[in-house]
Amino acid sequence: MDFSKFKKQFDKEHPATVYLILGDQEYLAQQIKDMFVDLIPEEERSMNIGNYDMEDVAVSAAVEDAISVPFFGERRLVMINRPYFLTGKKVKTKVDQTTDDFEDYLKHPEQSTIMVIFAPYEKLDSRKKITKALKKVATTVEIGKLREAEIKHLVTERVTSQGFKINPDALDRMMQLTGGKLTSMMGELPKLCLYNNDTKVINIDSVNGLVSRSMEQNVFDLVNMVLKKNAKQSMDIYQQLLLENNEPIRINAVLVQQFRLLLQVMILQKHGYSQGNLASALKVHPYRVKLAMQTVRQFKYDQLRDAYIGLIETEKEMKSTSRSPELLFELFVLKFMKH
């Protein structure tokens, strides 16, 4: 189920024994954590809530806590974070995770314990025995794959709860500047509300003036300026990225990724892929796909291909010569614009 459905159906009196929260939306994960913590009376929390990071602690420690009897209370809450052993990820950690105890626990979960596993990943490795065992038992809440309409609804809901309104164009601009990242948008709301405290209305001017631009948005603007062959604007945005302490080789790598995405979207659209199918197939945020679809309408395949190849060559030179990375990027821009 998704977050909205979970919130409506959550039974405080009779919660499930095991939950799996899947996805990397930090804001929603925190909302869910708060909901579970509220189930434990405040005076009992220090003794009956356990928090375990699997990159630092063995899962057997969390299991040992879960099978313990609540201390002067009715419930115990055990939260497991970053369970990388459910995925195919390689993680640098000194902890040697063995999941036998965890598998045994899932066969017979303790009825007085609520175990919540927060997995901030796009997906788990379904081939693993422990993943299969968990999915069989757990109530799964997916918080990672949010559509644009869902993100806007959650932001509007939060704004309304604070006694404010947000204009549609301001909300669209927030989506654009943050790359459609819900956690970033929620993080920007306090200063927007403070700035618009007199009117209680968040408008587009305050969004433009106060909301921090994500690197992805700056790169998106840079891509468009390059494709439109606007040398001055391209270099202005590039210099701004450098001022924000972004390494030239990293900027170039993100540009390569963006042009690769544009090419993939253009090709797959010709094969009948919709926006939703594209996001799923390419494993990227749906809002990034939406912006890419808007961009590819304005340009030809040859333009995207030439820019992509030029950036690949620039990256090779950055790694193999002692020439200034900034100069190499300037040469790429000038060469591309001469075509």
Image (spheres, rainbow, N blue to C red):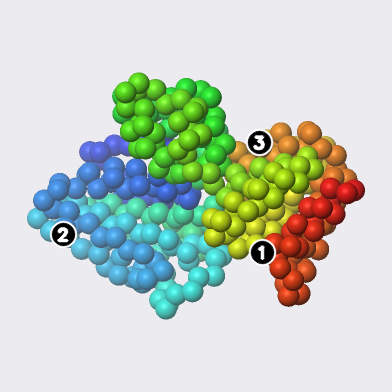
At label 1, the amino acid type is Ile
* Label 2, residues with CA under 10 Å away: few <14, some 14-19, many ≥20: few
Q: Are marks 3 and 1 in contact (CB under 8 Å)?
A: no
Which numbered tag is attached to residue 290?
3
Tell me if 112 is positioned left or right of 20 in this view. Answer: left
First in sequence, mark 1 or 2: give its number: 2
Tell me where residue 265 sits by quadrant.
top right
In the image, residue 43 above or below residue 99: above
* Residue placed most toward the observer, 180 or 329: 329
Residue wearing tag 2: 47
- The residue lying at 84 percent from left, 48 percent from top is 337
Q: Is residue 223 visible?
A: no
In the image, residue 12 above or below residue 170: below
First in sequence, mark 3 or 2: give its number: 2
Q: Are marks 3 and 2 in contact (CB under 8 Å)?
A: no
First in sequence, mark 3 or 1: give its number: 1
Real-space Cα separation, disc 3 to disc 2, in angstroms? 47 Å
The secondary element bearing badge 3 is classed as helix
Q: Nearer the viewer, mark 3 or mark 2?
A: 3
- The residue lying at 56 percent from left, 65 percent from top is 88
At label 2, the amino acid type is Met
* Label 1, residues with CA under 10 Å away: few <14, some 14-19, many ≥20: some
- The residue lying at 37 percent from left, 71 percent from top is 56
- Residue 113 horizontal/vertical position (percent): 25, 54
- Residue 320 horizontal/vertical position (percent): 76, 75
Tell me where residue 311 sits by quadrant.
bottom right
- The residue lying at 46 percent from left, 47 percent from top is 25
In the image, residue 72 above or below residue 199: below
- Residue 74 horizontal/vertical position (percent): 15, 50
- Residue 83 horizontal/vertical position (percent): 43, 62
Residue wearing tag 1: 249
